[in-house]
Image (cartoon, rainbow, N blue to C red):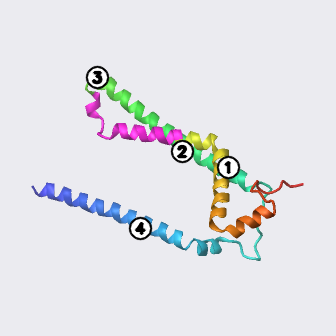
Amino acid sequence: MPMRATRYASLDHAAQLVYGGSAFVFAVAALLWVFADRVAKLALARPQQVVFESDVSVSEWQGLAFSVVGLWQTIDGLTFLSGRIVRLAIVHLAVGSGAPSLLPDDFYEWVAADGLRLVIGIGLLFGSRGLVGMIRKYRQVGYMLGDPSEAQHSNAAGATDSGPTPPT
């Protein structure tokens, strides 16, 4: 009997560590969100440092970043999904018709989650330009809704958010 109590006590301790760690991560994320301007000022280059300038437009950088994240998620989803499918095949070959009972209860949920990660990754990988365009349009609408005078000023100047002009 004491062994069972010890096991539950260790599970309670593990749960406290998980909850405490999660709370710490959320607290740090909240602080970074609230003080983003100060963190950005600390991260910006000082006047004596060289400022990074690029001939690549912001839209192209965003598309590249989304494509990299998409590739990462595609590889991650494909890796985990193929591993779970191989595990399922091995269990079916080893046991036969009673195989699903040997799998964890949430096995198919994880298969679905890995499949969704794979689909989202492929979408980000090949749809990054469309996502960048949606973000650009959202920023335009957000600026127009947030400050009407700023929207009128940008419309009066004939400015469209088509990105920076290409270098000559």
Query: What residue is at 46 percent from the left and 37 percent from the top?
Result: 115
Q: Residues within 10 Å of mark 2 (few under 14, many from 20)?
A: many
Residue 60 forms part of the magenta stretch:
no
Quadrant into which the C terminus falls? bottom right
N-term mark: 3 or 1? 3
Which amino acid lies under the numbered mark 4 shown in the image of this protein? Answer: Phe
Say if 165 sits above or below 100 in the image.
below
Foreground mark, 3 or 2, reads 2
Please state if 17 lies on the left or on the right of 57 as rendered: left
Start-end of magenta stretch: 99-119
Foreground mark, 1 or 2, reads 1
Alpha carbon distance from label 3 to label 4? 46 Å
Q: Which mark is residue 73?
A: 2
Residue 106 forms part of the magenta stretch:
yes
Say if 13 sits above or below 133 in the image.
below
Which amino acid lies under the numbered mark 1 shown in the image of this protein? Answer: Gly
Q: Residues within 10 Å of mark 3 (few under 14, many from 20)?
A: few
Which residue is denoted by mark 3 in the rendering?
96
Alpha carbon distance from label 3 to label 1? 51 Å
Which residue is denoted by mark 1 in the rendering?
133
Which residue is denoted by mark 4 in the rendering?
24
Say if 111 sits above or below 33 in the image.
above
Quadrant into which the N terminus falls? bottom left
N-term mark: 3 or 4? 4
Give SS at disc 3: loop
